[in-house]
Image (tube, rainbow, N blue to C red):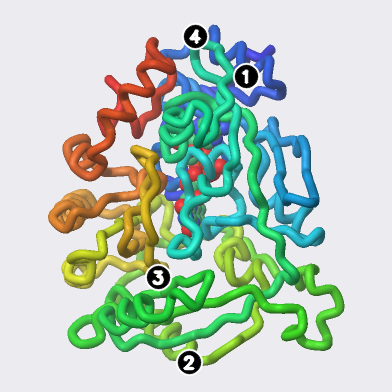
Amino acid sequence: MSQNFVTQQLSGWGRFPVETCNVYRPESRRQLAAILESSSQPSLISYGLGRSYGDAPLNVQGGVICDTRLNRFLVFDEQSGVLECEAGVSLAEILRYFLPRGFFLPVTPGTKFVTVGGAIAADVHGKNHHQDGTFGNYVLDFKLLTPKGDILSCSANNNGEVFWATLGGMGLTGVILSARIKLRPVASAWMQVDYQQAANLEDALGSMTESDIHYQYSVAWIDCLATGRHMGRAVLMRGNYAPVRELLASIRDPLAEPPRRRWTLPFDFPSLALNSLTVRAFNTFYYNLHRNAARQLVDLETFFYPLDAIYHWNRMYGGRGFVQYQSALPLAGGLEGLKKVLTRLSQSRRASFLAVLKRFGKSNPGPLSFPIEGYTLALDLPVASGLIPLVRELDGLVMDYGGRIYLAKDALMTAPTFAAMYPKVEQFREIKSRLDPGGVLSSSQARRLGIVRK
Ligand SMILES: Cc1cc2nc3c(=O)[nH]c(=O)nc-3n(C[C@H](O)[C@H](O)[C@H](O)COP(=O)(O)OP(=O)(O)OC[C@H]3O[C@@H](n4cnc5c(N)ncnc54)[C@H](O)[C@@H]3O)c2cc1C
């Protein structure tokens, strides 16, 4: 029973690439262990909720273990806020249960539809990286099932090397079974947000450098089609949790979220709908919509997960899918590097509604963890002819400035580019070979990037 799999076409959130994989959905730890021990697949990889954009959770013609049925809360200590749960629990499930009890996620990506296992494996970051670092900073420990059948308890002090290699290790060190996470106590489900227009990139980065320290959360939407003296014009959205005394009298329960209307994009947009004219018009509208405003009350869901309000928004980029191009550039030279990237993008006339700029704080010891101190820019590029040469050019620019591409978003990087961007990969391979000498765990991405042998 546990060895049953279904062969299906699978993709990440970008719907590119789409690959044929053999998908297992174990319902117990025992079934999971049996798959790892004796499946007939050439290799296996974990799959959470498929919110990474490319092929990190895919394994063409191989096995994929989807762990969303292993999703129990195990223990919660209300005093310390420490939650122990299985890795298939989603951040949405944690919020649904714990926000009304006064706890929020310590670090959250821009969607709540990711699993705890996926959040650890990508060592995800949020709008508070400059203050709080990555999700891994709040993982006290986790249990990892290795292909040898061992269950390792890993923390920064116990099996520390495995702990750090697994944070950002994209599922290649083992299957995360469960984790203990320290949740953040909050008094309300509301933020106080300042909106500030920035006339160009210098202005945006200058404001972030000068005043991000006053905000726990900071992010900027950026107009990646603006050129000349407006290049990189942006809207900074920065905020802190709203104290209860600041809430409107009409908000009876500070921890209750207001009801939210949800939409579904019912079909793929035709590719003509998205072009530089429509995006330019949208960008002008969006920029002008956000006039400078201070201390606006915004509920957590709207602030952290604006896109979750539209189910299947990834259909907006049409049936061929899209890639999200997320780079990080170091502080030194970062401004110049970002300008080069934006110049190249505006020349290419590629459309991206969603271009997001953030500041990163210090990196952690994870050999494949993405953030480096500096800036990160994420934008969506629809799949169309000419995309691959463009991405190669952008990769070259990012590399020239000492930057890197996020593995959770990547679908196109080459092995030499990856090796140059992640110089600690050899340390990662060494740890992986000890945990997985037979090379059981492998993904389409890991083979493309040469993290594992083909
Ligand atoms: C709208 C949107 C916004 C996003 N915003 C951000 C953001 O702000 N910051 C950020 O960092 N990321 C962001 N992401 C990316 C997302 O947070 C990561 O890709 C995350 O890893 C997805 O989790 P998942 O459960 O969907 O995992 P999947 O996408 O299914 O898998 C991701 C990786 O985790 C591994 N994995 C999954 N489960 C396990 C397990 N139990 N054990 C071992 N390995 C496992 C997989 O093998 C794979 O390598 C965003 C994604 C979307 C769609």
User: Mark 2: few, some, or many residues within 10 Å (few <14, many ≥20)?
Assistant: some
Task: Give the residue pinned by disc 3.
Answer: 353
User: Mark 4: few, some, or many residues within 10 Å (few <14, many ≥20)?
Assistant: few
Q: Secondary structure at mark 1?
A: helix
Give the residue drawn at x 65%, y 67%: 301
Q: Secondary structure at mark 2?
A: loop
Amino acid type at mark 3: Phe
Q: Which mark is residue 292?
A: 2
**In the image, is the residue at mark 2 within 8 Å of ligand 1 by its beta carbon?**
no
Give the residue drawn at x 30%, y 56%: 327
**3 or 1: mark nearer the eye:** 1
Task: Give the residue pinned by disc 4.
Answer: 40
Left or right relative to 13: residue 86: right
Quarter holding the N terminus is: top right
CA gap between label 2 and label 3 equals: 21 Å
Q: Position of residue 88 (x, y in %)?
A: 64, 36
Instruction: Mark yes or no: residue 410 visible.
Output: yes
Task: Give the residue pinned by disc 1.
Answer: 32
